[in-house]
Image (cartoon, rainbow, N blue to C red):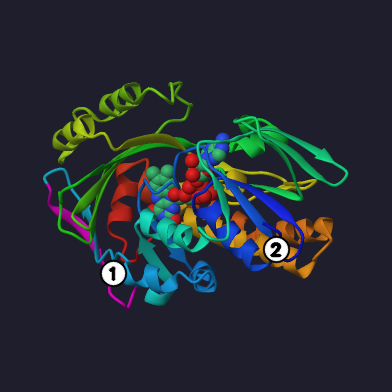
């Protein structure tokens, strides 16, 4: 397929950052190929939030109406005691939510499928494949894929998440950029309501938290805990990860036993550390990073999806403004986005410590009696 502007782009990753970048770059006339290691776009996972500027960008991408029609609404946050009494609560009415038009919570598959459907005729998707090597030449980036295909692209964009292969191959080891936030979490989604729908409940003891979030006849069960040191574990061994959660929470109060049983029985279990990616630059040569790959803020930000969308637009806008001058475009992308990323990452760090996993009884009491949502 020939592009209107003559430029070919390879995007690694078909999730929020990858599909948003693909959408905005095809609008600028780029010929876009997306390579994804899975056999379809990533739709599994917890609900995401499209906030602030990301809402306007969803209009630009032509998916706002679908997002708006399927939005989820948390109406009440409750802070629970061990005996299930309620220590404090926040009603999320229109008065104390910033603006309903500024914040859309949505199931991940709705966002992904809305974009994917729009791109099917304009973007080439290579599923079950991944980049193995990248080499910059005078006129592009020479890419080899796992299936042996080799091709030169004008631009390569890594949208392949927290454990990005593009970042690893082009910018260096994950350990050089990953910032451990001294906490771990697991999320288990069960297909039943464990609490009232549109409600979130939090139960804490010092250094440990349990959160329930109920929507669309499902409940997310989230266990989080503080850990000063990183815990070695095999990321492919789900049973080992379940055992870490069981050890951490066995014997705690409230509904812990019942919820741990759900964790043991569910096949929808995800475990990871709270972690951020901090890089001095998200671009090098003809390669750029967008979304979690470049500036993951952690789930504690509640902004990961929005950062991916806003980052995709920042890159597209810089490329449009400096058409033909990649160096200036990448400079602008780094400069314009940096203050916002710094702010979101700092807020996420505070959120982990003060709102999600307070470290003392006193701090838990302070959090439980607050009257505004975080
Ligand atoms: C448990 C959890 C809860 C969260 N809750 C929220 C929330 O409430 N609100 C919110 O806004 N955000 C939330 N987030 C964050 C949000 O999900 C991420 O920030 C967002 O998905 C980032 O999008 P991304 O496209 O950059 O990366 P990802 O969504 O991680 O997508 C990366 C894509 O790249 C693909 N990929 C990976 N490696 C390769 C490879 N080698 N080759 C090809 N493809 C590859 C993956 O398969 C995937 O499709 C949560 C995240 C987690 C893990």
Q: Splitting the image into 4 quarters, where does residue 270 fall?
A: top left
Residue 144: where, in percent of width, then height? 69, 34
**Magenta-drawn segment:** 84-98
- Secondary structure type for disc 2: helix
The answer to whether residue 281 is seen in the rendering is no
Side of 286 where 289 appears, left or right: left
**Which percent across, then down, holds residue 256?**
18, 36
84 is higher (above) or lower (below) than 26 = above
Q: Residues within 10 Å of mark 1 (few under 14, many from 20)?
A: some
**Residue 60, percent across and down?**
55, 73
Quadrant showing the C terminus: bottom left
Q: Label 2 belongs to which residue?
A: 336
Residue in view at x 82 percent, y 60 percent: 328
Instruction: Locate residue 234: give its quadrant.
Output: top left
Circle 1 SS class: loop
Q: Main secondary structure of the magenta part?
A: loop
- Cα–Cα span, label 2 and label 1: 32 Å
Does residue 126 show up magenta in the picture? Answer: no
**In the rendered image, is residue 103 in sight?**
yes
The disc at residue 92 is: 1
Report the residue at 58% width, 56% height from top: 123
State whether label 2 is within 8 Å of ligand 1.
Answer: no
Q: Looking at the picture, does residue 208 appear above or below residue 21? A: above
């Amino acid at each position: 397929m020939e592009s209107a502007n003559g430029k070919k782009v390879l995007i690694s990753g078909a999730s929020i950052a990858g599909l948003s970048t693909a959408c905005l770059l095809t609008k600028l006339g780029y010929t876009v190929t997306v390579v994804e290691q899975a056999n379809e776009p990533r739709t599994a996972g917890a609900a995401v939030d499209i906030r602030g500027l990301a809402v306007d960008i969803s209009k630009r991408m032509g998916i706002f109406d679908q997002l708006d029609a399927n939005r989820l609404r948390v109406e009440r946050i409750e802070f629970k005691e061990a005996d299930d009494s309620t220590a404090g609560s926040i009603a999320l009415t229109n008065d104390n939510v910033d603006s309903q038009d500024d914040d859309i919570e949505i199931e991940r598959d709705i966002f992904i499928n809305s974009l994917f459907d729009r791109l099917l005729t304009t973007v080439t998707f290579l599923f079950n494949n991944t980049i193995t090597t990248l080499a910059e030449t005078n006129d592009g980036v020479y890419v080899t894929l796992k299936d042996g295909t080799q091709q030169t692209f004008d631009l390569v964009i890594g949208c392949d998440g927290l454990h990005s292969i593009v970042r690893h191959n082009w910018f260096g080891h994950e350990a050089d950029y990953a910032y451990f936030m001294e906490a771990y979490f697991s999320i288990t989604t069960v297909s039943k309501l464990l609490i009232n729908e549109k409600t979130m409940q939090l139960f804490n003891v010092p250094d440990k938290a349990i959160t329930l979030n109920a929507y669309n006849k499902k409940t997310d069960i989230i266990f989080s805990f503080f850990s000063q040191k990183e815990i070695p574990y095999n990321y492919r061994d789900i049973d080992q990860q379940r055992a870490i959660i069981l050890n951490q929470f066995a014997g705690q109060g409230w509904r812990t036993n019942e919820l741990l049983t759900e964790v043991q029985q569910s096949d929808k279990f995800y475990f990871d550390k709270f972690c951020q990616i901090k890089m001095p630059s998200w671009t090098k040569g003809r390669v750029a990073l967008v979304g979690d790959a470049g500036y993951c803020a952690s789930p504690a930000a509640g902004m990961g999806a929005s950062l991916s969308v806003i980052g995709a637009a920042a890159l597209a806008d810089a490329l449009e403004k400096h058409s033909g001058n990649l160096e200036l475009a990448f400079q602008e992308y780094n400069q314009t986005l940096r203050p916002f990323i710094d702010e979101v990452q700092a807020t996420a760090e505070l959120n982990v410590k003060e709102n999600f996993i307070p470290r003392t009884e006193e701090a838990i009491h302070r959090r439980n009696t607050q009257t505004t949502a975080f």
